[in-house]
Amino acid sequence: MASWRRVRIAPSILSADFGRLGEEVAAAEHAGADYIHIDVMDGRFVPNITVGPLVVRALRPVTRLPLHVHLMIVEPERHIDAFAQAGADLITVHVETCPHLNRTLAQIREAGARPSVTLNPATPLVTLEEVLDQVDLILLMTVNPGFGGQEMIPSSPDRVRRLRRMLDERGLEGCAIEVDGGINEETIPEIVSAGADVLVMGSAVFGAEGGVAEAMRRLRALL
Ligand code: DX5
Ligand code: ZN
């Protein structure tokens, strides 16, 4: 399966033990994670509330891995600077929350982080079309955001294939496709074959039997 490219793993702290968050992140780095995925929820765009810039700041000295912040919040432009100052390396915004998407992506870059964009499973890919050349990582949600431990929506591999085609047609082969939600040992073969480059995983890493190190070893073996 896809041995010609290195698929990267981004454990999502949503499923970690928050009482031992620093240790959990250090364990993920030690076990070979490529990025740390931080899910920010506001209780408005999605039903849950999670964490803010304080937690990004607290994790910054714990790991050398890039911190990817996934903003599931309305009016993300009000908080982008705070997340960048707290140490976010990459900030992902939802197209559904950004009426002025060009401006918001530029704001992320000006704040010193890499901009990235994402969309819900029912949002057409065409909503990304005008900003494809402004990002080098696109996150495709493979569940409706808001909760960990959901099942991947079955149309996801086809969406990954269609996005890959859109990127290839525009000569943007270097743009990475990341997937988030329901990614685990069962869904990896199909989603990676479809063209996913970065796998966000919460419950498959932090909630897994045998602990983080054992989960990462199994996942790496599969990839
Ligand atoms: C869901 C979040 C995900 C979540 C994935 O809204 O964006 O990052 O942590 O969790 P799993 O991997 O358990 O589906
Ligand atoms: Zn996420």
Image (cartoon, rainbow, N blue to C red):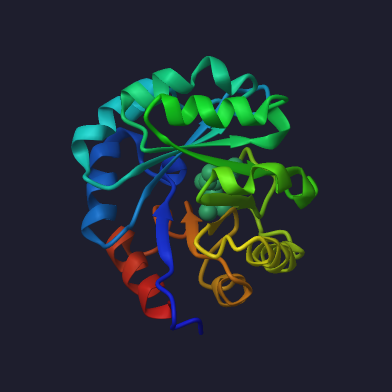
Q: Residue at x 51, y 51 (%)?
A: 137
Quadrant position of the C terminus in the picture: bottom left
Residue farthest top in this picture: 78
Left or right: residue 137 compared with residue 143: left
Rendering quarter of residue 165 = bottom right
58 or 132, which lies in front?
132
Say if 78 sits above or below 27 in the image.
above
Residue 63 image point, x, y percent: 22, 43
Toward the front, the furthest residue is: 171
User: Residue at left 33%, top 22%?
Assistant: 85
Q: Is residue 46 visible?
A: no
In the rendered image, residue 168, in percent from the top left (x then y), is placed at 64, 67
Residue located at (74% from left, 50% from top): 121
**Nearer to me, 30 or 169:** 169
Numbered circles on residues, count: 0
Above or below, 223 relative to 163: below
Residue 138 percent location from the top left of the image: 57, 50
Q: Is residue 170 left or right of residue 3?
A: right
Q: Quadrant of residue 83?
A: top left
| Residue nearest the observer in this picture, 174 or 45 | 174
Q: Examine the rendering and report whether any part of residue 60 can be seen.
A: yes
What residue is drawn where x is 50% and y is 50%?
Answer: 136
Q: Position of residue 164 (x, y in %)?
A: 65, 65
- Horizontal arrangement in the rendering, residue 134 relative to residue 53 (left or right): right
Residue 169 occupies which quadrant of the picture?
bottom right
